[in-house]
Image (cartoon, rainbow, N blue to C red):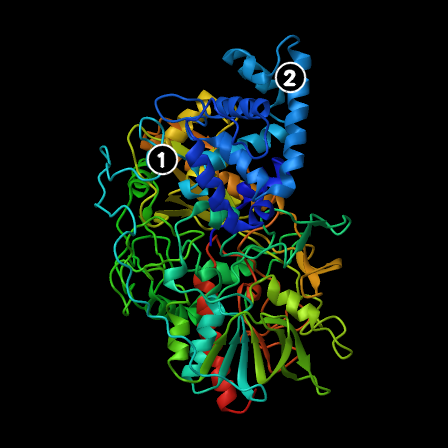
Amino acid sequence: MDASGTSRRNFLQASGGALGMAWLAASWPRVVAAAEHAHQMVGDTADRSKLLLLTPAQARDVDAIASQIVPSGATPGAHEAGVVYFIDHVHAGLWQENGPEFVAGLTDFQAKCAKHHPGVAQFADLPFDDQTAYLKHVEHTPFFGRMKFLTVLGLLALPSYGGNAESSAGSSWASSTSTRGNRRSGITTPSMPGSCLMRRPRSTTVMSTRKFKPNDTVDFVVVGSGAAGGVMARELSQAGFEVLVLEQGPRFTAADFRHDELDHWFNGALTNKLDTNPQTFRKSASEKAQRVTEFPAAWYAPNVGGSSVHFTANFWRFHEVDFDERSRLGAIPGTTFSDWPITYAELEPYYTKVEWDVGVSGLAGASPFDPWRSKPYPMPPLPVKSSGVLLERGARKMGWHPYPAPMAIASVPYKDRPACAHCGFCIGFGCEMQAKSSTLYTMIPEAEATGRCEVRPLSYVSRIETNAAGRATGVAYFDQDKREHFQKARAVVVCANGAETSRLLLLSANAKFPDGLANSSGYVGKNLMFNTYAQVHALFEHELNEFKSAQVTRVVHDWYDNDPQRGFYGGGGIDSRIGPMPIAWSLFAPPPGRTWGAGFKSLLEALPRAMIVAGHGTSLALETNRIDLDPELKDAWGLPALRMTYKDHPDDLAMVRYLQDRGVESMQAAGALEVWKEPVAESNGGPHLLGTARMGNDPQTSVVDKYHRSHDVRNLFVCDGSSFVTSGRGQPTMTIQALAFRAGDHIAQFAKRGEV
């Protein structure tokens, strides 16, 4: 997964907390009714008698405001799309609890407008230009922010959700921004199908046939089924051991996945829910952490397959420098910058195993900066897209070295899975074609096929139990009905992600381990790292139709290594990609001065001509950046909630701004008509959760050893992003899986020798 949720999170917080992700999550099935109503009412501008909440006068003003945000013209505006009826209906039904607050905001808006324009009955009666002038005075108010948010939802969400209705000209925003044909307009790329409307393949998912009994003692309990947990389950079960995988979320099949931006990016269809698993956030230990109300600070996918279900599938290997950079550069004051206890050479066979067993497409030797490899990729790279052609054009003009992106997506049929259908719904979505190499489709079915592995979804592990000798005896967990169970095991492997792994270790504190399991160093939860991320938007003369195919097809790594001449530590790369879908494009992409009105409308219409360049950089490890337990807030099971403390090191922000500037240069060199940067802000969360149970040789400064065995509890292992010592340059999942293959290999050997 890429770290691209930050700008969305910042916008939602700025536009009023009640209208963010948590607000959208309430009573989700009823949203369809709002759409039906809006669709029926569109065009009926005279008869307001069927309004459910708003008075006719209020509806006139709402319609007028929305029509200023997205004016009518050659393409439908908010009026033609029936946005006013969407806003009315959702506040009377789906978001009924927010109805009074919205009406109060509208009433205050109307009163202030009347005071500003004496003698005019209401906002809708003002001349259009006077309406525009007045809205410029109030565009930074919470009410206007909410109106923009609601207008965009009503305009661009799937028509079944409300708004986005057919105009009198027979054209909707669904067709004008999301489903254009395969016209390349001078950009030469291979032809790709526009959507996944073809018949889906038969699911290859093997559901667990092995069912362990309540009193069984399994060889291994694996907590989490994501990128690491899925690999661990396969490696240990194929080695002959009985493995029970406990996953807190549900199990989806290919038939469950939908192309729905609103549900996935704003309702969190596949990601963790803040109502049941709340979180708090602060920038320093001196602050009181505040409850997170929008996008989770620790953002992950609780389902079988974990975040490998909805990730972008960028699959860069780490380079040699990532493992021994401390020795090369020396200490960085104020950080815990350290070498890994393993080298690239030790991990290289397992990188190759990921590529061939999980399935990665790419072109070996295409980048002069790539580390050595023992074997080529098993599949050729995905077809280059318009954005890849343009980044390559601009990069070569700058003297840089673009190359085909390595992706965990099948470019050709591979291991009984079909090739990518180029539907464009990768990041944030499950792959119904099964081309994305998620552990849901790769490792887990192979583990289950051994007959020695059970995957038990909707099983929320609450603590790891130990005996008087300090050995793990199993785990306590809640089932979907919140009934508590205990599963006995000879060993426990925690692969719950870099946030929930450390939280579980802390929740497992007892008299023998008062500070949490595996925490004699005090490092559990500390040294949290993200990867920095920044975006550059570019508009071109001709349509690129970037909404098709995988996110990324070209990468540039000319700045991967640290360069002292920059004046700060760091490294990274840039890639070209789809960028936001229509709703996100309208909410997060516009530069200042074009966030509503005619300029905003022109940006909406320009989406097919748009692309982004994304910068991915390093994050330095700081003891002060951490995951721990909130002392007050509890989750739905009565357990202490996750608390995150995080503040970027200045070098991290400087590096990602440097990469962003290179993105601007590449797009200007490629001939973009317009280029602008999204502001780089301090992080308040992300999906790359790294470093919170770091590996090392010294028990005083690490949580696990080089084989992922806890220094303190000899039959407890930890393997996921929390094991990282440094952050790498932006795409950790490949390395997470290589570590899991290596750990699984060694753990199986330990067990066979009776050393677990």
In three-dimensional space, the C-alpha distance between marks 2 and 1, rounded to whole angstroms, equals: 34 Å
Task: Look at label 2 and name its amino acid.
Answer: Cys
Residue 218 visible, this angle: yes
**Percent coordinates x, y for residue 464 in the rendering:** 65, 76
**Percent coordinates x, y for residue 335 in the rendering:** 65, 54
Q: Which mark is residue 231?
A: none
Residue at coordinates 76% horizontally, 48% vertically from top-left?
Answer: 287
**Percent coordinates x, y for residue 654 in the rendering:** 56, 41
Q: Which image quarter holds the C terminus?
A: bottom right
Instruction: Classify residue 208 by image quadrant.
Output: bottom left
Location of mark 2 (residue): 113
Q: Which mark is residue 177?
A: 1
Residue at coordinates 58% horizontally, 79% vertically from top-left?
Answer: 492
Instruction: Classify residue 414 by image quadrant.
Output: bottom left
Task: Look at label 1 and name its amino acid.
Answer: Thr
Numbered circles on residues, count: 2
Q: Is residue 160 left or right of residue 292?
A: left
